[in-house]
Image: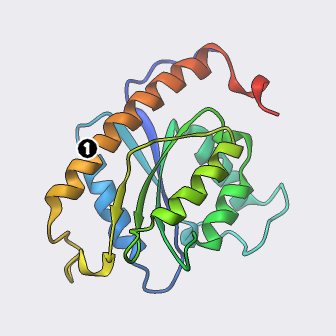
Amino acid sequence: MHRKLDPRINLAVIYGSTREGRLCETIAAWTIAQIEGDGPFAVDAIDPAELGSPTRHPPRDDAALLALKERIALADGFIVVTPEYNRGYPAPLKLLIDSVGREWRGKPVAFVSYGGISGGLRAVEQLRLVFAELHAATIRDGVAFTNAWDQFDASGQLVDADRAERAMATMLAQLHWWASALRNARDSVPYGQFAA
């Protein structure tokens, strides 16, 4: 069944941290501000801290889980905003990813990462493996904030925005291409028949 074609891409921005006082809120807000406007995306911000999700895998009929699955299913693509903690990504992000299954399939995932000297890239490399297992396609280019706590001022504004904004524009262009192409492909031939 073909859906009525909406030229805008439904893009879910997923917060990767639930820590108290997290920098994730600032970076996710910057990310969403870069996307919103008259552009080709409709944004849904998914924050695991606000989902009412349990701290372990819920039963299949859990209301919060069913709502999350519906939001992931409606998305044509994703941006994961993730910190790097101890050379990896946070446990709440892994729980969110693993709580959903086929809804990820045949969709692109991009990353905005942050951390110390690595800018969160070690967490992103691990996430690429996870999303490959879920039959999602990760975008090559991303945005990485090294020593992220020095990059934003007290009001949450990026101090030197030019480089990050250029990186975001490149990533969004790639994400739009992949999301459009894969949405058309999923509408023509459902991907699920190829997934193990």
Q: Quadrant of residue 140?
A: top left
Single out the residue that lies furthest toward the bottom. Answer: 20
Quadrant where the N terminus sits is top right
Q: Nearer the viewer, residue 41 or 193?
A: 193
Name the residue tied to disc 1.
Answer: 169
Is 193 placed left or right of 33 in the picture? right
Residue 108 drawn above or below residue 150? above
Where is residue 139? Give x, y as percent: 46, 41
Q: What amino acid is at disc 1? A: Ala
Residue 22 drawn above or below residue 194? below
Residue 136 drawn above or below residue 112? above
* Residue at 51% over, 35% down: 76
Where is residue 189? Give x, y as percent: 66, 15
What's the image's color scheme? rainbow
Residue 149 drawn above or below residue 102? below
Is 113 placed left or right of 49 in the picture? left
Q: Nearer the viewer, residue 44 or 114?
A: 114
